[in-house]
Amino acid sequence: MLEFKKVTFDDYELINTYYTAYPARQCDRSTAATVMWRNYYDNRYAVYDGTIIFSSNFTGDICFTHPVGRNVDGMLEKLEEYCKATDTPMTVCSVNKEELPFILEKYPDCEHSADRDWFDYLYEKEPMLLLAGRKYGTPRNHINKFKKLYPDYSFKEITDNDIDRLVEFTKSFSFNSEKSESAMQELEICIEVLRNHKKYNMLGGFLEVSGKIIGYSFGEIIGDTLFVHIEKADVSYGGAYQMLTNSFLREFAADETVKFVNREEDCGDEGLRKSKLSYHPVELIEKNTVKINL
């Protein structure tokens, strides 16, 4: 029977081996995100015949990710066995549109749904870098205004010497009752990432104005996609987010192997949705939850 083990830093390379061998362009299939959110979602994993699967409380109840590896069918059968033996509902989450037909064929008596709030925003890299043409006028104008207002800005790669200042910057984001539990948890995770940035081995850079940190980003490249996992900026500096996004891509997505940029979900935040749509995603990656009747 499958044995699920809690995800720790020690599992980073193992998880990365599977995700790089079987790349997908959705954030749920990225190593850093899986490890970053390991405690909040109680991420656990099991391996069978060159295939990995995760359990999580992502949906509020225990669910299982779509298997990744050479024997998806065999892993699903092992999952059936596990769910029956432990009296656990067999719910498979984060199933993308390429995977869904296989699940529906194997389990025709099932229910599936997709929540728009959790769709990933996927962009082509080149248009995001160049921001040419009328349709990119909004982010381009924000960047031009930022450059005019703050000509002494700079963007630098994160080093050990910057961590304390970045932690203090992160703490400056207010923790108040209006913030959701996940938003507060995200800030705590940002601090954890900063303090363990070498273990995460992510790409990281920060934006400064007159020597003051006003934003930073972390991300990773898997396959042909750059995943942007963290973006934090001081909105009192007009255009800070747009400048941070563009600077990060110019610094870390220059490699011609990078074709796409995944900026994750909007979680139903209308302001964030409007901002991410302004960059005209090439795809909103649909992620389905499938409830299988055993």
Image: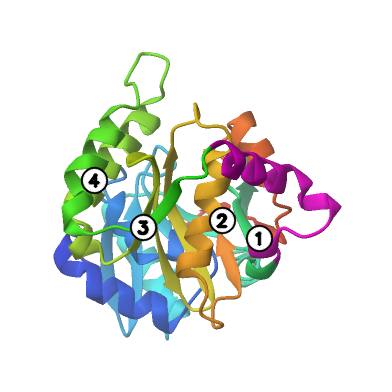
Q: Find the residue positioned furthest to the top.
A: 177
Say which residue label 4 marks: 39
Q: Distance between the residues labelled 1 and 3?
A: 20 Å
Q: Distance between the residues labelled 1 and 2?
A: 7 Å
Report which residue position mark 3 lands on. 156
- Can residue 145 be seen here? The reply is yes
Query: Residue drawn at (74%, 53%), measured in percent from left and top?
Result: 280
Tell me: residue 268, above or below residue 244.
above
Which residue ends up furthest to the right in the rendered image?
134
Which corner quadrant of the image does residue 68 belong to? bottom left
- Please determine whether, in this image, residue 23 is positioned above or below residue 41: below
Q: Distance between the residues labelled 3 and 4?
A: 30 Å
On the rendered structure, is 146 left or right of 62? right
Q: Name the kind of residue labelled 1 in the image.
A: Met
If you read the primary sequence from the N terminus, does the residue marked by circle 1 or circle 2 appear first? 1
Task: Compare marks 2 and 3 and give the one earlier in the sequence.
Answer: 3
Return the disc, 3 or 4, that comes first in the chain's sequence.
Answer: 4
**Contact? badges 1 and 4 (CB < 8 Å):** no
